[in-house]
Image (tube, helix red, strand yellow):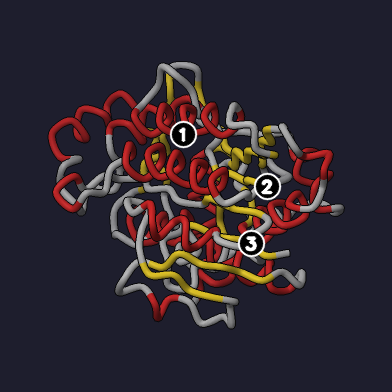
Amino acid sequence: MRVALIGGTGFVGGYLVDELLDAGHHVSLLVRRGSEDKVQADVWRKIPGDVSGESAIEATVEGCDGLIYCVGILRESPAQGITFESLQFDGVVRAVDAAKNKGVRRFLLMSANGAKVPGTSYQETKKRAEDYVLSSGLDATVFRPSVIFGDPKGKMEIATQLYRDIVKPPVPAPGFLTSAGQILMSPVHVGDVSQAFVNALTDDAAIGKTYELGGPEVLSWSDMIRRVAKAAGRDKWVLPVPVELMKIGATLLDWLPFFPVTRDQLTMLAEGNTADPSIIESLIGRPPAAFTPDNLSYLSR
């Protein structure tokens, strides 16, 4: 199968490229100028451009049977044209329209657990993109993963970021709490997410479905911090901190690149991010990988 991949130079995208090639598919990849070196795999073709260009997207999907859109950001940089609206909604609209123009029927979208309207800008653009894809008339499938972990291979990834921003500094780690208690998450391994995508690509039963993807354990934020610390060979004291208190700091400082979280990220964090592990298990045919020190061994490097 010839598959167009938009977002293949990112963390999850790199794993998707490898999984697609291992499954015998041919990959047509949209690559931003300056990111060519991020793709070492022997793909069918690389098209220079980005999601702001209709011609580049159409060239990427030309002659393909399926399209995977896997673009997402956690922070905006409006001065550089990096916004939730442009990447998580407008780009999806262009990709759907290009697929329809070029006769590509199969469309897989990477969304996010908790996508909704009303919500944060991140959540709303994800949900509007879902609605556009599912109402497009294409053979579409939407995936909503919880937080994704795994060897980042030089990219951005949750456990590496937690180590860098929270575990490594010589101060207590914030164990975020809400008025309802612990914040709960279902961290899911990037290899399992990419396999779920590729398996669904040729599964007609997945058409029209929205899948929430989560790992085998529901963990508190504090549990995740402790496991990251253990995997990195460190002891870490976790200090309970109300999310609302952290929001005050974010209100003042989240415009600074070094501040670890934004107000919207804290809002979403407080809502929790869990999923039924049987969903991804049904897609990949085996139990998903857990957020354990063994599976976080890359942090010790």
Q: Quadrant of residue 186?
A: top right
Give whichever of 172, 142 is nearer the camera. 142
First of labels 2, 1 by sequence position: 2
Rendered location of residue 110, percent (x, y): 56, 45
Q: Earlier in the sequence, mark 1 or mark 3?
A: 3
Above or below 41: residue 299: above
Q: Where in the figure is residue 173, as x and y percent of width and height? A: 37, 47
- Amino acid carrying mark 3 in the image: Val
Q: Residue at x 61, y 30 (%)?
A: 134
Please name the amino acid that badge 1 sits on. Answer: Lys
Residue 174's place in the image compared with 201, above or below, is above
Q: Residue at x 34, y 54 (%)?
A: 53
Q: Kindly identify which residue carries mark 1.
A: 126
> Do callouts 1 and 3 mark residues in contact (Cβ within 8 Å)?
no
Inter-mark Cα distance, 2 to 3: 9 Å
Left-right relation of 54 to 211: left
Q: Residue at x 82, y 47 (%)?
A: 203
Seen in the picture, residue 218 relative to 149 is either above or below; the reply is above
User: Which-is-in-front pick, marks 2 and 1?
Assistant: 2
Place residue 10 in its image quadrant. Answer: bottom left
Q: Secondary structure at mark 2?
A: strand
Q: Residues within 10 Å of mark 2 (few under 14, many from 20)?
A: many
SS state under label 1: helix
User: What residue is pinned by disc 3?
Assistant: 3
